[in-house]
């Protein structure tokens, strides 16, 4: 029983679904294949054309808070946003000091078998706290919580950068082949479930089609 789980470090909805993914692993004895992708702002920057605070971001923020309240999870606007973007205009900066660093750390953690645990620990800092998440001590705390060391992960992410980028891009191609470009995306037996709100539908399908 293997499930593909496509995840982005910029997606609050990916953060919201992580506790249920962990529960699936622990209670259903399911092998979840962690498939990290770059955020849509990197993969498809044209998606954000004509999207600004009034037409897009304000309504998204309201929905993030609604979902967080329904799940009993804390939610705050990330500080800093993993993607540098002008939310008044939707324009994505040509300089991205955070997202590649954090994605490559996360993929390096995945090679240690800690992709999902690292994603949850870091997402809890990105979206679940008021404090900034990009400080060295915070990142060190995240790494230590899953039995890893930040300095070593940084070394590995630089040393294996070409492989990391290739693997993430492969995930993105497989994601599109599965049928959707969004996250979180769960794929089981060639059927995809897009969005944290589709988790219950996935779980029903999964239990009915285990054989």
Image (cartoon, rainbow, N blue to C red):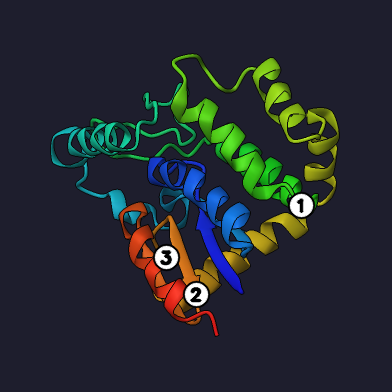
Q: Nearer the viewer, mark 1 or mark 3?
A: 3
For label 3, the residue is 203
Local secondary structure at mark 3: helix
Apparent side of residue 209 relative to residue 102 in the rendered image (left or right): left
- Crowding around mark 3 (Cα neighbors within 10 Å: few <14, some 14 to 19, many 20+) is few
What whole-number distance in Å separates the C-alpha atoms at marks 1 and 3?
24 Å
For label 2, the residue is 188
Q: Which quadrant of the figure contains the C terminus?
A: bottom right
In the rendered image, the residue lying farthest to the left is 54
Q: Is residue 199 above or below residue 126?
A: below
Local secondary structure at mark 2: strand
For label 1, the residue is 113
Judge whether residue 123 can be spotted in this image: yes
Q: Which label's residue is closer to the chain start, 1 or 2?
A: 1
In percent of the image, x 38 and y 52: which residue is there? 45
Relative image position of residue 87 (x, y in whole percent) = 28, 32
Local secondary structure at mark 1: loop
In depth, the one of 164 and 120 nearer the eye is: 120
In percent of the image, x 56 and y 67: which residue is there? 4
- Crowding around mark 2 (Cα neighbors within 10 Å: few <14, some 14 to 19, many 20+) is some
Q: Nearer the viewer, mark 3 or mark 2?
A: 3
In depth, the one of 1 and 95 nearer the eye is: 1
Q: Which label's residue is closer to the chain start, 1 or 3?
A: 1
Q: Which label's residue is closer to the chain start, 3 or 2?
A: 2
Relative image position of residue 66 (x, y in whole percent) = 23, 35
Q: Are marks 1 and 3 in contact (CB under 8 Å)?
A: no
């Amino acid at each position: 029983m293997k499930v593909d789980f496509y995840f982005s470090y910029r997606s609050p909805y990916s953060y919201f679904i992580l506790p249920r993914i962990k529960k699936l692993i622990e209670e259903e004895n399911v092998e979840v294949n962690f498939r990290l992708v770059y955020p849509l702002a990197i993969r498809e920057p044209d998606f954000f054309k004509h999207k600004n605070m009034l037409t897009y971001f304000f309504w998204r923020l309201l929905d993030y808070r609604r979902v967080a309240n329904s799940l009993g999870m804390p939610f705050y606007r990330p500080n800093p946003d993993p993607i540098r973007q002008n939310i008044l205009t939707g324009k994505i900066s040509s300089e991205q000091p955070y997202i590649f660093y954090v994605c490559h750390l996360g993929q390096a953690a995945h090679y240690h078998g800690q992709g999902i645990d690292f994603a949850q620990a870091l997402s809890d800092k990105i979206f679940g706290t008021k404090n900034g998440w990009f400080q060295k001590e915070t990142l060190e705390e995240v790494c230590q919580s899953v039995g890893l060391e930040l300095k070593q992960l940084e070394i590995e992410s630089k040393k294996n950068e070409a492989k990391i980028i290739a693997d993430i891009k492969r995930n993105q191609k497989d994601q599109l082949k599965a049928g959707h470009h969004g996250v979180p995306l769960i794929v089981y037996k060639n059927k995809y479930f897009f969005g944290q709100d589709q988790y219950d539908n996935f779980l029903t399908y999964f239990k009915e089609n285990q054989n």
